[in-house]
Image (cartoon, helix red, strand yellow):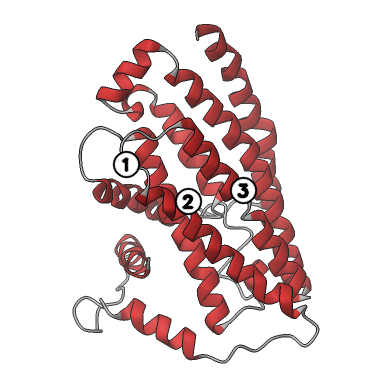
Amino acid sequence: MAFFTLLERKIIGLIHYRIGPRKLIIWGISQPLRDAAKLLCKETIRNSYSKKIIYLFAPILGIVLIIILWFFYYFSSGEISSIKILSIIIISSLRVFIFLLTRWGSFSKYALLGGYRAIGQTISYEACLWAIILILFYFCEIPFINNYFIKFSLFLIFPILFLIWLFLWLAELNRSPFDIAERESELVSGYNVEYRGGLFTVLFIAEYGFILFVAYLTCRVFWRAGGIIETKILVIRRILVWIRCSFPRIRYERIMTLSWKIILPFVCLILPFVNIIV
């Protein structure tokens, strides 16, 4: 995860015509380790009005969830079943409680507003994500699609579904251009504004670990034909960074309108036709 952050900074630097980390050892390869050491050595200053147990439990919950999710990487050799995907989506939906606990335990109005935005955005796009997963399950029940899916990749058959899938996960991950809940380019960083030092590092690890897991899940669902899984994850990860560098941030009300008035009706219109075909 640490070296993926270095890759992200390198790609952003190249796209924006800037110089990324390059002076520490070779190509700045030790920069993530130095950043982690600096954060872990910082003092954790807690608001005196914050709820201590909830304040500490939120980062712990984040790291526990990502560890549980990565168990699917080690125990998912061979075909990935619908039960596994449903289990992954159910566990990932518990990320909402991280935003809830961070804003509740921080006792800060800035964390409160960031948490509200994160919870509303995550729940809204999870509804669309469940619908697109149902469509994928229905498609795989078609004999021709199932045979073609085993030999090649679902991405080659339905590239539109792949784009919608990637689009929904970007919003679910609070990544650009949907990073309204956590705006690191501004003075106030949303729901994690009261976290610093080691606790901020744990939240950061949970966030980027989940991003890498989504890249792995996308490869297993859409790009299952040959190749090394790590190479495919790297390609998906670079696509996410490219999107972050290319599109401006969307206002919050437009994000919610896009979810409930455009994407969800579109997906719900596709679902009956697929059911009829099956």
Q: Secondary structure at mark 2?
A: loop
Residue highlighted by disc 3 = 93
- Amino acid marked by disc 2: Phe
Helix, strand or loop under label 1: loop
The image shows residue 114, relative to residue 70, as above or below, that is below
- Quarter of the image with the N terminus in it: bottom left
Q: Is residue 225 left or right of residue 73?
A: left
- Mark before the other along the chain sequence, 1 or 2: 1
Q: Residues within 10 Å of mark 2 (few under 14, many from 20)?
A: few
Q: Quadrant of residue 89?
A: top right
Q: Determine the residue positioned at 48% across, 84% down.
A: 39
Left or right: 14 with respect to 165? left
Of the numbered discs 1 and 3, the one sitting upstream in the chain is 1
Which residue is at the far top? 276
Q: Secondary structure at mark 3?
A: helix
Amino acid beneath label 1: Ser
